[in-house]
Amino acid sequence: MKANLGTIDRSLRIAVGLLLIGLSLSGVIGLWGWIGLVPLATGVFSFCPVYTLLGIRTCKRS
């Protein structure tokens, strides 16, 4: 797995994931808020399988 997410993309994914999980835990939204685990995980690991399939890369090439 090579990283394919840039810094801004990672930050936004982590923020959205934490926001969705937090809203779900506080009862503002339902259980579907746990879908926030997906963007959180992809942001933490800097890898998005969908980006790989589509040939997208938002990080700088090394």
Image (cartoon, rainbow, N blue to C red):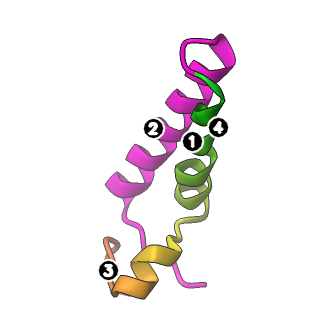
Give percent across and percent down for residue 55.
Answer: 34, 87
Q: Is residue 58 left or right of residue 50?
A: left
Give the mark, 1 or 3, whose residue is nearer the N terminus: 1
Quarter assignment of residue 4:
bottom left
Identify the residue under disc 3.
56
**Circles 4 and 1 in contact, beta carbons < 8 Å:** yes
Residue extent of the magenta highlight: 1-29
Identify the residue under disc 2.
16
Residue drawn at (63%, 12%), measured in percent from left and top? 27
Of 29 and 46, which appears nearest the observer? Answer: 29
Give percent across and percent down for residue 1.
Answer: 61, 84
Viewport quadrant of the C terminus: bottom left
Give percent across and percent down for residue 11.
Answer: 42, 47
Identify the residue under disc 1.
36
Residue 56 on the magenta segment? no
The residues tagged by marks 4 and 3 sit, at their Cα atoms, a distance apart of: 26 Å
Which amino acid, by three-letter code, is at mark 4? Trp
Above/below status of 9 relative to 62: above
Identify the residue under disc 4.
34
The residues tagged by marks 2 and 1 sit, at their Cα atoms, a distance apart of: 7 Å
Give the mark, 2 or 3, whose residue is nearer the N terminus: 2
User: Helix or strand or loop: what does disc 4 sit on?
Assistant: helix
